Amino acid sequence: MTELHHPGIDPAMARRNRRVALIGMFVAAGMVGLAYASVPLYQLFCQVTGFGGTPQTASEAPKGFIDRQMTVRFDSNVANDLAWTVTPAALVTDNIGKVDTVSYVATNNSDRPITGMAVFNVSPERAGVYFNKIECFCFTEQTLQPGETVDMPIVFFVDPELDDNQELDTIKEITLSYTFYASDNEGS
């Protein structure tokens, strides 16, 4: 490959400039790629670590419970664009490690079918890694017909390993909060 030589431009300097430009393009492309991957990577990080109060998913109950009680409160918030009324479950006080089942109650207040989803978190945040859901309506989209009311169950437990974390010795209450919103597939 022959290089064009312009008077006053050092060929070595031109090669360095091209190299810097290529490196800059690769860095920019990498940053765009990371921007697109950041949301799923952050969600995965939160699910694995419980960061930000993200509850864990469990396939089975723990192997027993301990003689320490925990109260779990339930909260619901509904986005303005979702014509649902959602009533949270009543609070539960039980031994840590015991499996409990509660239900939220959702009603479609519109005259058309509406599909919704729920996102959740646990507070205090540092207890999120110990809050485990075996079954939850939040794992899938929910479609409610006009005027329909449904029970939306959650099967959960608080992991007995919480008792090993001295930072959580004073925690006596956990709040599981859901925010309901219209699904992107709503109306389909």
Image (spheres, helix red, strand yellow):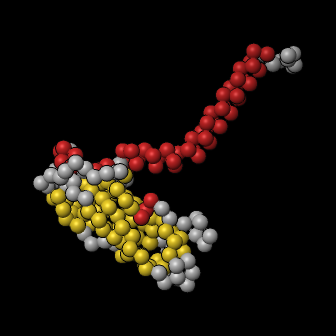
Q: Position of residue 46 (x, y in %)?
A: 41, 48
* Front residue of this view, candidates 148 and 182: 148
| Residue at 34% across, 64% down | 154
Quadrant containing the N terminus in the rendered view: top right
Q: Position of residue 128 (x, y in %)?
A: 31, 52
Q: Is residue 159 left or right of residue 179?
A: left
Image height of 111 relative to 2, above or below: below
Quadrant containing the C terminus in the rendered view: bottom right
| Quarter location, residue 134 | bottom left
* Front residue of this view, candidates 60 and 175: 60
| Residue at 77% across, 20% down | 14
Residue 53 in view in this figure? no
| Residue at 45% across, 46% down | 44
* Front residue of this view, candidates 62 and 89: 62
Q: Position of residue 95 (x, y in %)?
A: 17, 58
* Front residue of this view, candidates 30 and 92: 92
Residue 57 in view in this figure? yes
Q: Is residue 97 left or right of residue 114?
A: left
Q: Position of residue 3 (x, y in %)?
A: 85, 17
Image height of 103 relative to 120, above or below: below
Image height of 44 relative to 8, above or below: below
